[in-house]
Image: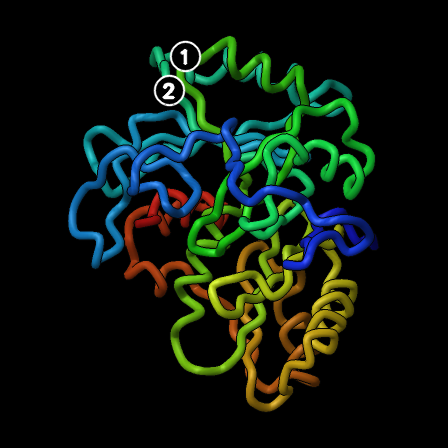
Amino acid sequence: MQETGNNILKRDGLQDGKPAGNSGNMPTDTPTGAAGQANGTSADTKTGNTGTGSILRRPRLTIRIGKHSLSFSALNTDNSNSITYEPYTVRSGISTAANLREAFREIDLLRNGWQRAMVLIDSPVLMIPIEEFNEAHKETLYRHAITGHEGETVMSVVLPTLNAVAVYSINKDLKLVIDDHFGDVRFTHVCAPVWNHLYRRSFTGVRMKLYAYFHDKKIDVFSFQQNRFRFTNSFDTNLAPDAVYFILNVWKQLAFDNKRDELHLVGELPDRNMLTQELKSFVQNVYVINPKAEFNRAPITEIKNLPYDLLTHFMGN
């Protein structure tokens, strides 16, 4: 088990260094568009009543890129409340960029003449308070905080509702393949729609909440307070005992109340029964988020193995 490189800088600057600098410089490499994109992901136009969780109309191909996974999805033209979702079997022994090139030759969905794409990248994150962010310093800060990604392009996405900027990276060859295939590309971190959705969800009730999102054989653990991240970090594991250890360690670190506060789990839970039973031995209020119930049984929730981040990406409002 391994704790990965998601980091959050405190409001008064780096944990081990100087403040990040001028707050007036915003990221430029991840387009955020008009006011409809306040959640840090693309939002072209909307369809239907957002009060019922209608899917955003996105005339873009959505590409989700994980460490060992690759998938493609797009809004169905004949049904604005459903999508076509095609996971791609990644070949071991070749790079993600090479896998993507193969996918362009093999998958019918990719032959529809797409000119616009939305790319969700899963990579280690450095979270910086928005008032501390300086575009000119982001790469230096990222290289200082995150190791093992020196040959990658550093990118960022603004999270306005959380007063934060998520800095992440993408392999240069992979980005080149994407840029070569599309004239208009937007990038964001794979967790951006999840952070935004669960932040809005956190206003339900008055208790403090800790969230654990299971995906890509790891866990993203985070909590919110006063329109900001109180905590965010990522842990590499797909084993229930390790997950229990990491989650309870964060719970204790944040001094949550075992009888009053809430723990919410979502995503690809390993050994769900064992995981929840062990957590309930220490935390009274443990909940597993059910996407079908949460999104009123929308057609998209019926898609097998659809990652929760893609679900919140398409259902975002």
Q: Are marks 2 and 1 in contact (CB under 8 Å)?
A: yes
- Above or below, comparing residue 34 to residue 246 in the picture: above
Would you identify the image quadrant in which residue 116 lies? top left
Numbered disc 1: secondary structure? loop
In the image, residue 81 sits, relative to residue 224, either above or below, namely above
- Residue 203: x and y in percent read 40, 72
Q: How is the image coloured?
A: rainbow
Q: Quadrant of residue 151?
A: top right
Q: Which residue is mark 1?
A: 183
> Residue 239: x percent and y percent?
75, 59
Which residue corresponds to the image point at 58% horizontal and 54% vertical from the top-left? Answer: 268
How far, Cα to Cα, is label 2 from label 1?
Answer: 6 Å
Q: Which residue is mark 2?
A: 116
Local secondary structure at mark 2: strand
Q: Within 10 angstroms of label 1, few (less than 14), some, or many (20 or more) residues?
A: few
Farthest residue to the bottom: give it: 259
